[in-house]
Amino acid sequence: MSTDIDHQWTTRLRRKVAGKLPPEKLLPDTQPSYVSSWIYVFGVTTMSALAVVIGTGFLLSLRGPQWWHESSVGHFVNSLHLWSVEIFFFAMVVHLWGKFFMGAWRGGRTATWMTGVVTFLASIATAFTGYASQSNFDSQWITTQAKDGINSTGAGAFFNVLNLGQMLMWHIVLLPLAAVILTALHVLLVRIKGVVPPYADKAGEAL
Amino acid sequence: MSKSFRPDVDAPEWKGGHSPYDIIKEGTIALVVVGLLTIILATLFGSPDDHEITLKNWANATPVDFATTAINEMNGTTTTAGYGAPYNTASDGQKLGPLTLAKWAGVRIPVNTERDFVIRPLESLPYNAQLSSALTTWKSASSSQRTTWVNNYTKADAKLAYTNGQVVSTATDAGPVPVFINDLTNMARSGALDTALVSGGNFFSTDYTKPLLFLSDGSYLADLAQKQHLLGSQWGMMNETNSYPGQAWLWLYTFWYQVSPFSTSANADVQVWATMMLLSVIMFLVPVIPGLRALPRKLKVYRLIWREHYRK
């Protein structure tokens, strides 16, 4: 017999979450034995690089956008930020290709694939706004070139790459938030659905 | 065997064994390794930071190019003057087939190059009898008179020179235009134009739209970019100054600009963007596109990835 507590939104949400993502799925201590390849390293490498990107971004934000132009320490932090971004994209692209060759959307993992693709696209936009916010020769050239592409779609009327303030706010607030939320969603889906099994030699047979 | 099993949609059931997996340890090790690799790369290679170019730099380095660009902002022949949306209505902008997407979005960042890049900055200068008189003459003249003056000055712009701190023109019957071009050039050389275009009368501003548009209308910025291999024809969108990797992940976007029909199209930007949007949607929809989702099964790269599993 159900009680009032059973009908509470909180109770229902907790039960739903616990059903879909029990602790042993969220933080597993075993994995299927087919999960044995270097390709699996690139997912966690992407996540780690994202953490370093965010950490170095936090450090850059402490003293404001001019700091890295005026201080050798600031410039080094900018270098850390740059190279963590390069590692992030390298790992992410290898991860993406790896998942494509595994057919990683199989077995009800379509949403996992799709959130991964959107995260990739959001990351490109985040990195672009970073390049546009450098306030140096690179950003002058990149923005004056990129404006033509974005303007040609009509989006330039609302997303003005020549507006440093707008680009910086998108780079440090809106897009990183989107990238982090999408990454979290992607990882939760991986944990809920598990890692895709290999293809069977004969369609339909169990492995 | 289930008849309804779709090998590119369904995954086989795993009945094999499991191995120990310490997800926290794996994440910690990855974070430490990536952190160390980042420190090593940053220490070895640093990061580029070529100083920004100002209108002051430009007008001092190549005053004639600056003056020529200034008169072109007045006669409407610069890129910005003829751009269309979102800056003005001078053209329909690029077209994707019959679609004028930029025009539909409208003029949201209005820029009148004659007014915003020449007249208003000159009005912000401290009182100068000659300039004040020139501005008064300009404001009281008819539109056709202004056009005649500007055109007469433009006809002689191939012989423009900068001598003894003055823009020298052989133009005749150009009204107040020679004063404008000379004073604007010297305003730029002093650095005052940079401030005037950014601030627009405000104390605070973070919007560099106008000085960047003016700067990119001249040839000085592009000449510097060419030396750094940053032009569009040099895969410029993805490059950075010096030899840094830049936005290497934009290689496919930049690639289209190098090949026909995009490389010779007047609508290349919108065509490349449409192509990339289409490819992005296809990538997003791979799991539901028959044929495409079968590729990994047919290519069999997975047998390399899971070689231990298949060896067993």
Image (cartoon, helix red, strand yellow):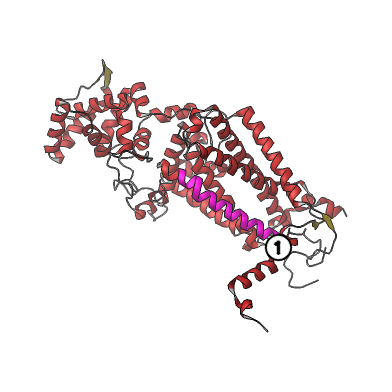
Residue B160 rendering spot, x and y as whole percentages = 26, 22
Above or below residue B154? Residue B99 is: below
Above or below residue A18? Residue A36 is: above
Is residue A185 on the magenta stretch? Answer: yes
Q: Quadrant of the N terminus of chain A?
A: bottom right
B300 with respect to B127 (left or right): right
Label 1: how many Cα within 10 Å (few below 14, some 14–19, many 20+): some
B19 with respect to A176 (left or right): right
The single residue placed furthest to the right in the displayed view is B312
Residue B296 rendering spot, x and y as whole percentages = 71, 55
Residue A178 rendering spot, x and y as whole percentages = 54, 53
Q: Dot 1 corresponds to which residue?
A: A193
Identify which residue is drawn at 54% across, 49% down.
Answer: A176
Give the amino acid at mark 1: Lys
B100 with respect to A64 (left or right): left
- In front of the other: B28 or B92: B28
Residue B29 found in image quarter: top right
Residue B63 rendering spot, x and y as whole percentages = 31, 23
Q: Secondary structure at mark 1?
A: helix
Q: Which residues are magenta?
A: A168-196
Identify which residue is drawn at 63% across, 57% down.
Answer: A186
Identify which residue is drawn at 68% across, 35% down.
Answer: B37
Main SS, magenta residues: helix
Q: Quadrant of the C terminus of chain A?
A: bottom right
